């Protein structure tokens, strides 16, 4: 009996030590995430100061806005805030570099949680600021084509070493940019992942995907109160930007407050030209790419029904769903998004 009690005491002692180690590990991960957030917030403040010269361009607004699929659904199980990385092995993984492409108004800053988790998994995440976005201080009013808007991404792919491939991840209208890149460089892109994104068809405009929420492109160009007239009110609009309350409701209805605060300081006007441009995609190039789609099921900017329609019309190789995610899963459900990215990376 004495030996049994001693054995139980030793087991409890070991369990207690393990629990303490786990708590220390969780605290460290939380501290790391907080440090990353503060760094991103500091960068956002600096960016806001740099971009103040563009505020005047936002002052004139008019009108008012009245093949085979693999499907997975995930909710984010790590609600206590501690990071838990799913089982993952780099063994046999030939492509380890992820290029993360933000959507309209966002910048590379929005991926800070995903960058940290991918790095912890031993992968190499790269972020880009598209033209006029994030720290790219080009005046958005001067960006009139998808080619101009996507130039930082295209230049990065052009400079990749021969034979090196990457996994592209595009969020929201960043889907148009990665589609454009897939048409240009199909040989350099291992997989293209569309995160609640504009996976457009040949001849379709990125804006068309949002027509259910924003109305037709023609009506939006005539009536929207969010339009920006950077070349003067007598000239066609050059961009748009939602008011903060609209952005919170559309993009961040499930996101943490600290991430909403970061976004409110960092979002920039959206160049209108790239959104209204009809994208040319060919079966010989874009059509040969491996495409995957991640749906967000509590999305108010691009509704689940619209995302389902995109999947039906464009037939990606795999479809994944995140429960409880708004239009910004890198904020609202980062662990679920991370897990799906790892799972897609491992598909042969």
Image: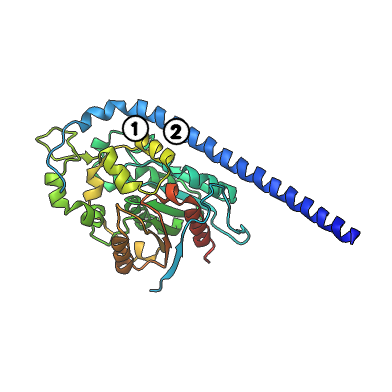
Q: Name the spot of residue 272 as percent of width and height, x first.
A: 23, 44
**Mark 1 burial class by Cα count in 10 Å: few <14, some 14-19, many 20+:** some
Residue at position x 37%, y 59% from top? Answer: 297
Secondary structure type for disc 2: helix
In the figure, is residue 48 to the left or right of 272?
A: right
Residue 149 seen: no
Of the residues tagged 2 and 1, which is closer to the observer? 2
Q: Which of these two is toward me, 186 or 332?
A: 332
Specify the farthest residue to the bottom.
67
> Disc 2 and disc 1: Cα gap in Å?
18 Å
Residue at position x 45%, y 56% from top? Answer: 188
Mark 2 = which residue?
41
Secondary structure type for disc 1: loop
Specify the farthest residue to the front.
1
Residue at position x 35%, y 61% from top? Answer: 286
Residue 194 seen: yes
Question: Can you tell which quarter of the image residue 27 is in?
Answer: top right
Mark 1 = which residue?
137
The reply to whether dot 2 and dot 1 touch (C-beta < 8 Å) is no
In the figure, is residue 25 to the left or right of 181?
A: right
Question: Can you tell which quarter of the image residue 52 is in?
Answer: top left
Label located before the other in sequence (2 or 1): 2
Q: Which of these two is toward me, 198 or 130?
A: 198
């Amino acid at each position: 009996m004495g030996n049994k009690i001693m054995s139980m005491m030793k087991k409890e002692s070991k369990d207690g030590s393990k629990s303490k180690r786990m708590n220390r590990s969780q605290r460290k991960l939380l501290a790391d995430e907080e440090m990353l957030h503060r760094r991103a917030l500091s960068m956002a403040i600096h960016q806001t100061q740099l971009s103040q010269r563009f505020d005047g361009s936002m002052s004139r607004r008019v009108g008012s806005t009245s093949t085979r699929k693999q499907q997975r659904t995930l909710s984010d199980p790590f609600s206590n805030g501690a990071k838990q990385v799913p089982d993952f092995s780099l063994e046999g993984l030939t492509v380890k570099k992820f290029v993360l492409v933000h959507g309209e108004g966002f910048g590379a800053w929005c991926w800070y949680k995903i960058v940290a988790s991918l790095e912890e998994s031993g992968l190499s995440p790269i972020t880009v600021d598209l033209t006029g976005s994030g720290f790219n201080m080009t005046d958005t009013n001067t960006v009139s084509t998808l080619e101009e808007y996507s130039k930082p991404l295209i230049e990065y792919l052009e400079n990749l070493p021969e034979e090196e491939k990457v996994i592209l991840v595009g969020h929201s209208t960043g889907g148009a940019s990665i589609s454009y890149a897939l048409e240009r460089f199909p040989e350099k892109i291992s997989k293209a992942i569309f995160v609640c994104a504009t996976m457009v068809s040949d001849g379709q405009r990125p804006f068309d995907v949002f027509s259910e929420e924003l109305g037709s492109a023609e009506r939006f160009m005539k009536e929207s109160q969010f339009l920006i007239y950077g070349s003067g009110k007598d000239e066609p609009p050059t961009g748009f930007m939602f008011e903060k309350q609209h952005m919170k409701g559309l993009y961040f209805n499930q996101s943490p407050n600290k991430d909403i605060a970061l976004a409110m300081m960092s979002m920039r006007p959206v160049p209108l030209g790239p959104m209204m441009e009809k994208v040319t995609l060919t079966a010989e190039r874009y059509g040969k790419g491996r495409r995957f789609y991640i749906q967000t099921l509590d999305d108010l900017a691009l509704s689940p029904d619209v995302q389902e329609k995109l999947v039906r019309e464009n037939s990606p190789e795999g479809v994944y769903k995140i429960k409880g995610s708004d239009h910004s899963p890198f904020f609202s459900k980062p662990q679920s998004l991370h897990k799906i990215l790892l799972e897609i990376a491992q598909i042969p």
